[in-house]
Amino acid sequence: MNIKEKFGFKVKELREQKGYSIEYLANISNVDRNYISDIEKGQRNVSIEIIEKIIIALDSDFGAFFNDKDFKK
C-alpha cells in the first residue's frame, strides 16, 4: 500500500467510525465530496492544507492520525 492509499484508508476508517457520510465530511471540512472520495480511494496527492482540514473535521490531530500502525508498514 502506498502513502496515498494509507492516508485514504485512514480517512475512510475514521469517517466511518464517526458515522459520517462523505457528504457530511465534505461539508464540515470544506473539501469537495468528490475530492474526499478520490482521497479515500488513494487517487489523490493531498496538500498539507487539505490534510489539516480533514484531520480537524475528523476530530483528530496530526500525531494521533499519523502514529497509527497503518502508516508504519
Image (cartoon, rainbow, N blue to C red):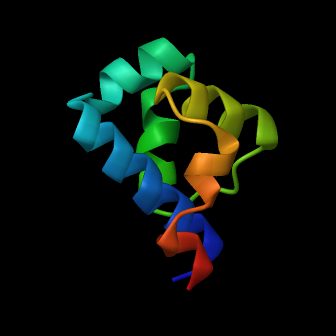
Residue found farthest to the left = 19
Q: Compare residues 72 and 41 and report the one nearer the observer.
A: 72
Is 34 positioned to the left or the right of 24 in the image? Answer: right
Instruction: Give the quadrant of the C terminus.
Output: bottom right
Question: Which residue is located at x 51 percent, y 83 percent?
Answer: 1
Question: Which residue is located at x 48 percent, y 57 percent?
Answer: 8
Percent coordinates x, y for residue 26 in the rendering: 45, 23
Is 57 positioned to the left or the right of 41 in the image? Answer: right
Question: Which residue is located at x 64 percent, y 26 percent?
Answer: 53
Q: How many marks?
A: 0
Q: Compare residues 35 and 51 and report the one nearer the observer.
A: 51
Percent coordinates x, y for residue 51 in the rendering: 67, 40
Percent coordinates x, y for residue 42 in the rendering: 50, 63
29 is higher (above) or lower (below) than 62: above
Q: Quadrant of residue 54?
A: top right
34 is higher (above) or lower (below) than 25: below
Question: Which residue is located at x 69 percent, y 33 percent?
Answer: 52
Residue found farthest to the right = 48
